[in-house]
Amino acid sequence: MTISFLIISGGKRDVSLKRLLKSIEAQRISGYETIVIGRMDRRNTPANVKFIDAPELADEAAICKMRNMALESSSNPIAVLMDDDVELEPGWYSALKKYLDDDRWDIAGCRVLGPSGERWYDWNWASRTDPLCPPRTLEYGEQNDGLYISGCLMIIRRRVLKKIRFDENLLNHQRDDVDFCHRAIDAGFHFASFPEAVAIHHMEPAGRSKDDPGAGSDSFSEAIYLFRKGEHKKALELFRKQPSSTKVLYHIALTLKGLEKCDEACIAFENLLKRADRKNMDDRRFYYSGSFHMGALKEKERKPEEAQRYYREALKGFPEHKEAAEGLERVTGSFKTQ
C-alpha cells in the first residue's frame, strides 16, 4: 500500500521545503504522490510534485482548511500530513512500511525529534477542559482520552474524512491538531504509534503564525529557535534584548534553568510571578507554569517545604499538571521523613 505526502507551506521556507522533498525522494517509495498546498517557489521543483495554489489560506494560517483540501485531493488511502520544515530520516519509510497493511489503525504518529534531538509532541496528552494547561508527552502506544499527535507530522487514513474533518474555524496553533484528535477518539477511531520511523521537526523561525508561542519580533523568534536547539547561551543574549514582558521574563527564567543557573533562574521566576496578571490568559499560563518550574528548582535545591508550596500553587491553576502532582508527592514524602 502506498501513501500521499501532503505538505502545508506558507512560502517562507523554500530551503526547508526542498530539504523535505529531497528526504521524501530518498525513501525510494513506489507509487507515492506529493502534494504541496499554500505558497511555494515552483522553480526547480521536482516534476512529480502537485501544487495547490492557496496563498490567501497560507497568509491567514488557515491550516485546517488546507489540510482538508489536501486530503480531498489525495489519491492514496493513507496520507502523511506535514509541515514544510520537517525532514524524514533515512529509513523512515522502511520502518513504517510493515504497518501500512494493518487495517486496525486510523491515525498514527512516528517519532518526531525537535532541533535539540528531544521528542517533539509526537505522542502526547492535552487537557480537554483547560486549553492553557501544558501538554505532556506520553509513552509511545499509551492510550488516553487526552491523546493527540502534533499536526507537524500526522499519518491518517483518508476514510477518516467520511466521519470527521479538521475544524476550519481553527487556525494554526489554535489547538487544531488537539481538537481533531480528541474528536477522532470520540468518534471511535484507533490511534497507533510507530517510533521506529524517525523524522526531524527543525522548527525554523521563519513563517510563524501569530498564535505560535514562538511568534514575535524576528530576534525573539530566533531566540526561541536557539532555545529549542539547546543553544541556551545565545538564546539568553537575545531574550535579554527584548522589551520586557511576562512572555520574555518567562523565557529568560526558563533559559537560565536550562543553563542550570538555579539562583538566577529562581530570581527570574519570582519576578515573573510578581508581575503576572492571572486574569490575563497568557499571564495565567506563564504564572502557573512558572510556579511549577520554581517547585522543580526548589526540589533540586533540597528545599522540600518551599518546593511543596510552589507545586501546590501550580496545581491550583492546572489541576491536571501531572509533573507538578508527581513533584508534590515526592517532596511531601521527603518532607515527612526529615
Image: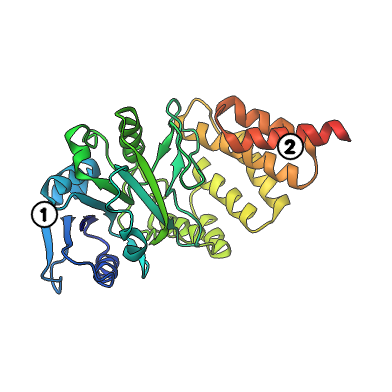
Q: Would you say residue 39 is visible in this rendering? A: no
Work out how far the residue at label 1 is from the one at label 2, CA to CA, in angstroms. Answer: 53 Å
| Residue at image mark 1 | 52
Earlier residue among tags 1 and 2: 1
136 lies left or right of 326: left
Q: Amino acid at mark 1?
A: Ile
For residue 207, which quarter of the picture? bottom left
Quadrant that contains the N terminus: bottom left
- Looking at the rendered image, the quarter that the C terminus falls into is top right
Instruction: Report the disc number at residue 157.
Output: none
Coloring applied to the structure = rainbow
Relative to the observer, which residue lies in front, 100 or 226?
A: 100
Instruction: Please give the residue where the numbered disc 2 appears in the rendered image.
Output: 330
The percent position of residue 4, horizontal first and vertical second, equals 19, 56
Q: Nearer the viewer, mark 1 or mark 2?
A: 2
Q: Indicate the secondary structure of the residue bearing disc 2.
A: helix
Judge by depth and name the residue closer to the eye, 167 or 288.
167
**Number of labelled discs?**
2
Residue 46 seen from this side: yes
x, y percentage for residue 97? 31, 60
Q: Amino acid at mark 2?
A: Arg
Q: Residue at x 31, y 42 (%)?
A: 104
Crowd class of label 1 (few under 14; some 14 to 19; many from 20; radius 10 Å): some
Residue 58 location (% of width, % of height):
20, 50
Which element type, helix, strand or loop, lies under badge 1? strand
